[in-house]
Amino acid sequence: MSDQKEKDKLSENLKRIRPIFKKEDAVVSSSFKKTLIATDIHGDYHALEFVLKFAEMKKVDSYVFLGDYIDKGRYSVDVLNILFDMKCKDPNKTILLRGNHETRGLSPWLEFGEDLVNDPKLMDDSNAVFDEMPIAAVINNEIFCVHGCIAGFDNETLKSISKKDPKKYLWNDPGAENGVQPSPRGNGIYSIGPDLVKSFLKRNDLKVIIRGHTSHTEGVKCWHDNKLVSLYSGIHSDSPEIRAAVAIAKGDEIKFYYFRKTRMGFEWTDEKKKLKLK
Ligand SMILES: [Mn+2]
């Protein structure tokens, strides 16, 4: 569990970061040479450290995290502090999207809420900051990043996305059937079919969606003729079959790198996957 020192640090970080998020639109864009994309760190401080060391070795010059920084793991506060430090240091270089755990509906009730149970003000301040986080990002004018999925309504554009009503973007999933299907996750949440994903990309002149949110053991799952990639960088087991992944976007190419957890710590696997966007 995160200690008091980290909680004090979070309190300071929240004050610094709120105006930075406030200034950002619901959809932020960035174009750098090499962008690391990771998602669903879920309080796993050690996984985050491992991924950031790798990014440094690969000489990435920007970062996009797709939300769900807190809960599940034991170090939600530490993870937020590392990422908020990065964001404050250079706001353009690090994009921190909102996940469904960074919401009032979930954050007070799980591990993060447990961490802050004796500090309701810190919980309130955290939620106020979560409310200001951007919902989606466009990288290199062609990669659409979001925690859940698109909302799935007719003629949906980037302009339809608002910080005020983010639920569908944080909670939806891709689905195999065309159109929108109700989701077992709950009311007002949907599975989005290949027709809607493809028309959204075409209408907004984008090439691919990268999203997190769905926990799976393969690290990367491609949907809808590679038009949507479900990425998962969280790992909560040291079974050798369970892999997590991160992506590096460079020009018209996205490379995926897989890692697993062993009793000795994290290690990269030899497996690689490449997606060409042109
Ligand atoms: Mn999620």
Image: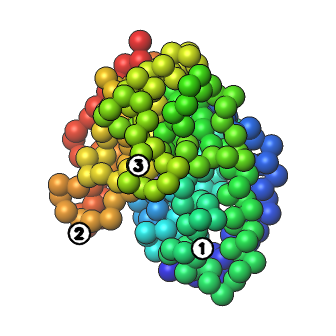
Location of residue 169 by image quarter: top right
The three-letter code of the residue at mark 2 reads Arg
Quadrant in which the C terminus is drawn: top left
Q: Is residue 117 above or below residue 17?
A: below
Q: Which residue is most to the top?
A: 278
Q: Is mark 2 within 8 Å of ligand 1?
A: no
Give the mark, 1 or 2, whose residue is nearer the N terminus: 1
Q: CA distance from mark 1 to mark 2?
A: 32 Å
Q: Residue at x 32, y 32 (%)?
A: 177
Q: What's the mark number on residue 263? A: 2
Asked if marks 3 and 2 touch (Cβ < 8 Å), the reply is no
Q: Secondary structure at mark 3?
A: loop
Q: Is residue 60 visible?
A: no
Name the residue beneath numbered marker 1. Answer: 108
Q: Residue at x 70, y 40 (%)?
A: 162
The three-letter code of the residue at mark 3 reads Ser
The three-letter code of the residue at mark 1 reads Pro
